[in-house]
Amino acid sequence: MTVSLAAIGLGQLGMHELGVYDRMPDVEIVAGADIDSASRETFAGEYAVPTYVEYEEMLAEHADELDAVNIVTPHTLHYDQAMSCLKKDLHVFLEKPLTTDVNDAQTLVSTAAEYDRTLVVGYQRHYHPAYQKIKEIVDDGRLGDIHAVNCYMGQDWIRKFTDAWRTRPTLSGGGQLYDSGSHLLDTLLWTTGTTPISVGATMDYQDHEVDVNSALLLQLERDGLPVTASLVVTADGVEDPSTYEGLVIWGSDGRLTYNRDVLTVTERGDDSVEIPIQGETDFLTLLDRKLTDFIEAVRNDHPPSVPGSYGLTVVALTEAAYKAHESQSMVEIQSILPSQVSH
């Protein structure tokens, strides 16, 4: 089956992703759209296909010949763009986050189900061998019952993006917590197999329009048991372009620590053992894995690894964190979910 694909968003990441698709067998790039003329010019120089300023025009012209659309645009634009594609009966790959509004996220998930279309969110840590190994160790029960987690992330982000859309709330929806921090929230929930129950938060904007530092206190649940967690994200770090990121998981039988590609497990009464990480971890390899997963899901080879329903959970937790900061109180995740997904 040849998958015919269009792209909304032709910037640097969008072009990287199109390059991956172009190298795949039986994937055909049909058209692209971007409001930026330089991005359109770069795309046109690479692919001999139609290019559009407005994605609506592109969909009107090509929806009948398309199977899927790749969307890499500012966060607050995701909902309208993805909805337009789903209503044209097209599969959708969205870079994170799914949306910046929990009601919009639920509507996307419901619409994808209604049209029986694949909706995928681009959380690449699901394809990273270190995080896959962490999840395997947790799920195998090597640490026993998980009861506490600490994770953190730091980047030289706020100075790098001071004049970019990422620091404009109307386009980003928020600061570092909604940007790279979204990957950390995903990592926390996915590797530990936990469900978020409630969150408290404090944030520091450092005279910017968006959050720079965030500290979260989370009550999670795994297999009916409580898990206490903490999370710190800073956009005023010193790492650029690398990210300083770490994770510690405590269980009844052991502790797992991961930082700077070093993974260790300490079982009760034993010395720490370093666990080897097998497989490539570079950006382009992870990009290839997540986009291949999307195309295989479109072809019905298997369900997507990161479906829209999972992205909804991360959006709900993120929005609850912002509400917790505003109210200076713990916020229950279920209290902000739309009624159709409250249980």
Image (tube, helix red, strand yellow):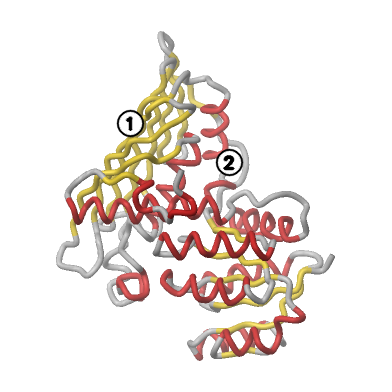
Q: Do callouts 2 and 1 mark residues in contact (Cβ within 8 Å)?
A: no
- Measured as percent of width and height from the top left, residue 139 is found at 55, 28
Left or right: 51 with respect to 271? Answer: right
- Residue 212 vertical placement versus 146 (above, below): below
Could you tell me which residue is drawn at 20 percent across and 50 percent down? 202
Q: Name the residue type under label 1.
A: Thr
Q: Element type at marker 2?
A: helix
- Measured as percent of width and height from the top left, residue 157 is found at 31, 62
Disc assigned to residue 129: 2
Could you tell me which residue is drawn at 27 percent across and 56 percent down? 322
Between disc 2 and disc 1, the foreground one is 1
**From mark 2 to mark 1, how far is it between C-alphas?**
25 Å
Work out which residue is located at the far right of the displayed protein and give it.
Answer: 1
Could you tell me which residue is drawn at 60 percent across and 46 percent down? 280
Pointer 1 residue: 228
| Residue 54 lies in quadrant | bottom right
Q: Which of the pair 331/23 is nearer the observer?
A: 331
| Residue 40 lies in quadrant | bottom right
Q: Which of the pair 219/190 is nearer the observer?
A: 219
- Residue 195 vertical placement versus 237 (above, below): above
Q: Which of the pair 272/75 is nearer the observer?
A: 75
Disc assigned to residue 251: none
Q: Looking at the image, is mark 2 or mark 1 earlier in the sequence?
A: 2
- Measured as percent of width and height from the top left, residue 74 is found at 43, 73
